[in-house]
């Protein structure tokens, strides 16, 4: 096992220097790419913690036993499991000038060399204290000891010569304490590499532009091309104007939380920086709907550029015209035309936002709230109100109670109600989850609101009052397993497990989000108790 671990390290190192630095030339002092692991102890501890949480304690014990039997109780002799290890890559001026190394913390050089001898790893040493290991794959691996670390590389000894050797404390100096971190300085990538990437992106966009769809109209073609051009524009910005990319994975044993985060930092003052900054400044009254009692909160908020909005508007106009042409009844055509005219301002606005909430539980029932951003929502609400009023007159008297207009008001905003049509699937959801089949809805000038549940009326009234803009995000998925456990748990044993893992007041959140600002950030957070609960419920269900 020890031999396998060592050879795996050497194989990874072989990827770190695919082209040698030209002799006598120095590369950029700061690494273009750094991967850092907090320590071997932290990595194994976190791995063991996750494995045990998902109900695989036996596997965790087997791994621990295998490590001790094959590597030894002392671990990899000579290797320090408490210090950081990782790898770095640096670029020179030319595309083929690359150097780098894998860094392994060492406690004692002689002990490590003795370990290699014990494992029958044949090595030779040159006058500059650089060791060579000849693999059976015709790839030589080189290593040396310096700064209490083992530097490993491949193909060329230039990467680990004195003039190219980095101080590990500086090479692995990444802020934060994440278990695993990766930082790529994109602005250090050679210009030739970026030009190749830009050319490949351009070729892909041109090829996509030539692929016309079946029965595609001129307006649809223009929208597709506008969309591809916008993708190309953003792709160009990503390649040309990205300064740094960072990835972190961490498991915090104290807070019992898993966090994964990816960040893209733009070149300051660039167009890319302005785009990301604008995403961080999105605001909307709908963003403030979620309170402390939400079991689920999902949101999408998008803003299209003007050129794309204009092309999309042409597609919408074309679709409306075709729809009206297909209606032969003059009265129905007039009604449809009125409704379309009320919808078009929102459809063509270029900014779209959807919010969905599950609130509760309250006596094991949930109230669902949905909202969608509108432009001139009062006009749409009035048009729909008049159409529904006419439609209700055509409904048999015994069915009219299923539709109720103007049941309540918040200021001048009317609230309406309709009975959800009963189907076997919906009936179960209404009976077991919602507890009420009356859907409430209302139109505010900036949004339309829907609510379903025993507290639907109170919930929608409170939402209509809330008009204070709050910071919005392009994407959000926030799910509290602790609040939804009563629905997920199907057996008494699972419900007992839920009570154990999520005692009163304990949250069990899975939260995924995309944010703008100084960086474009995608983040996933998960309580480890959620991972344990889902894994054990899955095993109990035999999945």
Image (cartoon, rainbow, N blue to C red):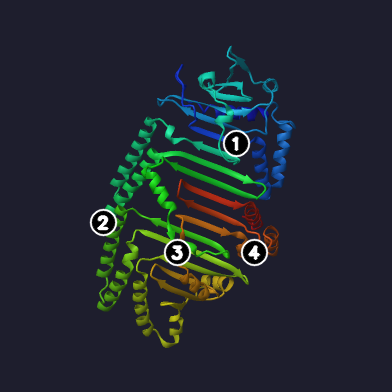
Q: How far is disc 1 from disc 3 in space, using C-alphas? A: 42 Å
Q: Which is closer to the viewer, label 3 or label 2?
A: 3
Which class describes the residues within 10 Å of circle 2: few (<14), some (14-19), or many (20+)? some
Q: Nearer the viewer, residue 173 or 89?
A: 173
Q: Is residue 285 above or below residue 253?
A: below
- Asked if one can make out residue 404 in the rendered structure from this viewpoint, the answer is no
Q: Nearer the viewer, residue 541 or 281?
A: 281
Residue 60 place in picture, x, y as percent: 70, 43
Residue 85 falls in image quadrant: top right
Q: Which is closer to the viewer, label 2 or label 4?
A: 2
Q: Which residue is mark 2?
A: 219
Q: Which residue is mark 3?
A: 285
Mark found first going from the N terminus, 1 or 3: 1
Q: How far is disc 2 from disc 4 in space, using C-alphas? A: 51 Å
Q: How far is disc 1 from disc 4 in space, using C-alphas? A: 40 Å
Residue at the top extreme, as displayed: 127
Q: Is residue 172 above or below residue 116?
A: below
Mark found first going from the N terminus, 3 or 2: 2
Q: Which residue is mark 4?
A: 490
Q: Which residue is mark 1?
A: 37
Residue shown at 55%/25% (left/top)?
166
């Amino acid at each position: 096992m020890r031999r396998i671990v060592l050879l795996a390290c050497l194989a990874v190192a072989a990827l770190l220097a695919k082209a040698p630095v030209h002799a006598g030339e120095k590369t950029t002092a700061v690494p273009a790419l750094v991967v850092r692991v907090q320590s071997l102890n932290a990595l194994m501890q976190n791995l063991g913690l996750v494995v045990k949480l998902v109900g695989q304690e036996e596997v965790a014990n087997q791994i621990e036993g295998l490590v001790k039997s094959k590597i030894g109780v002392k671990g990899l002799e000579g290797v320090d499991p408490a210090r950081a290890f990782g790898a770095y890559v640096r670029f020179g001026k030319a595309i083929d000038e690359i150097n780098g190394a894998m860094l392994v913390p060492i406690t004692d050089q002689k002990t490590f060399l003795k370990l290699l001898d014990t494992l029958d790893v044949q090595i030779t040493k040159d006058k500059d204290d650089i060791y060579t290991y000849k693999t059976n794959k015709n790839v030589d691996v080189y290593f040396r000891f310096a700064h209490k670390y083992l530097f490993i590389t491949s193909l060329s000894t230039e990467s680990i010569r004195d003039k190219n050797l980095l101080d590990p404390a500086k090479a692995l100096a990444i802020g934060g304490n994440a278990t695993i971190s990766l930082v790529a300085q994109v602005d250090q990538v050679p210009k030739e590499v970026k030009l190749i990437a830009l050319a490949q992106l351009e070729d892909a966009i041109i090829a996509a532009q030539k692929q016309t769809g079946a029965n595609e109209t001129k307006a649809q073609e223009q929208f597709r091309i506008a969309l591809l051009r916008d993708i190309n524009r953003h792709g160009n910005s990503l390649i040309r104007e990205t300064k740094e990319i960072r990835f972190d994975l961490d498991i915090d044993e104290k807070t019992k939380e898993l966090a994964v985060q990816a960040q893209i930092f733009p070149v300051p003052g660039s167009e890319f920086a302005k785009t990301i900054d604008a995403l961080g400044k999105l605001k909307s009254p709908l963003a403030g709907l979620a309170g402390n009692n939400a079991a689920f909160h999902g949101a999408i908020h998008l803003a299209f550029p003007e050129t794309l909005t204009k092309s999309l508007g042409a597609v919408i106009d074309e679709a409306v015209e075709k729809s009206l042409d297909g209606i032969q009844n003059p009265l129905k055509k007039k009604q449809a035309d009125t409704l379309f005219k009320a919808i078009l301002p929102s459809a063509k606005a270029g900014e779209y936002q959807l919010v969905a909430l599950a609130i509760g539980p309250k006596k094991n029932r949930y109230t669902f709230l949905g909202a969608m951003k509108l432009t001139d929502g009062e006009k749409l609400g009035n048009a729909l109100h008049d159409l529904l009023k006419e439609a209700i007159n055509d409904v048999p008297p015994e069915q009219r109670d299923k539709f109720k207009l103007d049941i309540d008001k918040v200021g001048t905003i009317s609230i309406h109600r309709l009975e959800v049509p009963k189907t076997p699937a919906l009936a179960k959801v209404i009976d077991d989850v919602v507890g009420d089949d009356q859907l409430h809805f209302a139109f505010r000038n900036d949004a339309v609101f829907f609510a379903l549940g025993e507290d639907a009326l109170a919930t929608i009234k409170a939402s209509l009052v809330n008009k204070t803009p709050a910071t919005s995000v392009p994407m959000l998925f926030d799910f509290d397993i602790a609040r939804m456990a009563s629905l997920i748990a199907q057996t008494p044993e699972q419900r007992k497990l839920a009570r154990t893992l999520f005692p009163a007041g304990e949250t069990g959140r899975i939260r995924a989000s995309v944010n703008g600002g100084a960086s474009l950030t995608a983040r996933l957070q998960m309580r480890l108790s959620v991972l344990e609960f889902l894994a054990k419920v899955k095993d109990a269900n035999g999945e």
